[in-house]
Image (cartoon, grey):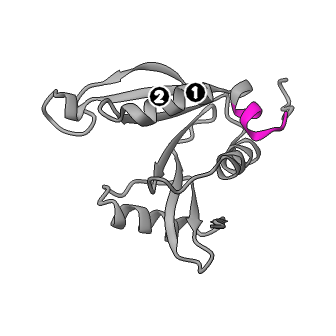
Amino acid sequence: MTRGLIFGQDNVVAAWAFSTFKIFPTRVDRAVGIVETDGTLIGAFLLENFNGYNIELSYYGPWTTTPGIVRSIARMALHEFDPARATVITSKRNKRLIKALLKFGWRVEGIQRCFYGKQDTQRNTGVRLVMFRDQIERIAGVRIRNAAG
């Protein structure tokens, strides 16, 4: 099964993710869609809240990504944002994803209580993971030199 990526359709991809996964719409800096060969959206990477140094990454579409897709997202993030770090927040209950992210080089930075709801429960706790520039470049398979470095 060959999958592809859609770049340059940020609003369409973000709207699909918000609607499909019933997510509160937020401002998105970039959205990359994952599509089947027929063009059907099956997944989305949302890059959000870039502050000049940190970019937050959200992923929607379980079982839709491949190492090549991850490499492409890392390259795009480096070229378009030049981040010093990237962060991901996921549910504390999502042990499988946390374990996978740790294998890729992400590190647990902390937890965020009440991230998914008003009550402080296991269900509403988010785990914040971080990946720094050198690991992003390793995954992308490139080394980007910026003015400072």
Magenta segment: 136-143
Residue at position x 62%, y 51% from top? 66
On screen, residue 95 above or below 15: above
**Which quadrant of the figure has residue 21?**
bottom left
Q: Between residue 44 and residue 82, name the one nearer to us.
A: 44
Reply above or below: 129 against 22.
above
Residue under circle 2?
99
On residue 40, the disc is none
Image location of residue 51, percent across then percent down: 57, 36
Tag 1 residue: 103
Residue 128: x %, y % from top left:
42, 27
Identity, as a three-letter code, of the amino acid under mark 1: Lys
Give x and y (percent) for residue 124: 22, 34
- Is 127 one of the magenta-colored residues? no
> Within the image, what quadrant is residue 18 found in?
bottom left
- For the residue labelled by badge 1, is the local secondary structure a helix, a strand or a loop? helix
Residue 3 vs 24, above or below: the answer is below
Residue at position x 41%, y 35% from top?
Answer: 96
Q: Secondary structure at mark 2?
A: helix
The 10 Å Cα crowd at callout 2, few under 14, some 14 to 19, many 20 or more, is: few
Closer-to-camera residue (39/50)? 39
Q: Quadrant location of the C terminus?
A: top right
Please identify the residue farthest to the bottom as the structure is shown. 38
Q: Position of residue 98 (x, y in %)?
A: 44, 30
Q: Amino acid at mark 2?
A: Lys
Count of numbered marks: 2
| Inter-mark Cα distance, 1 to 2 | 6 Å
Residues tagged 1 and 2 counted as in contact (Cβ below 8 A): yes
Horizontally, is 58 left or right of 3 in the view? left
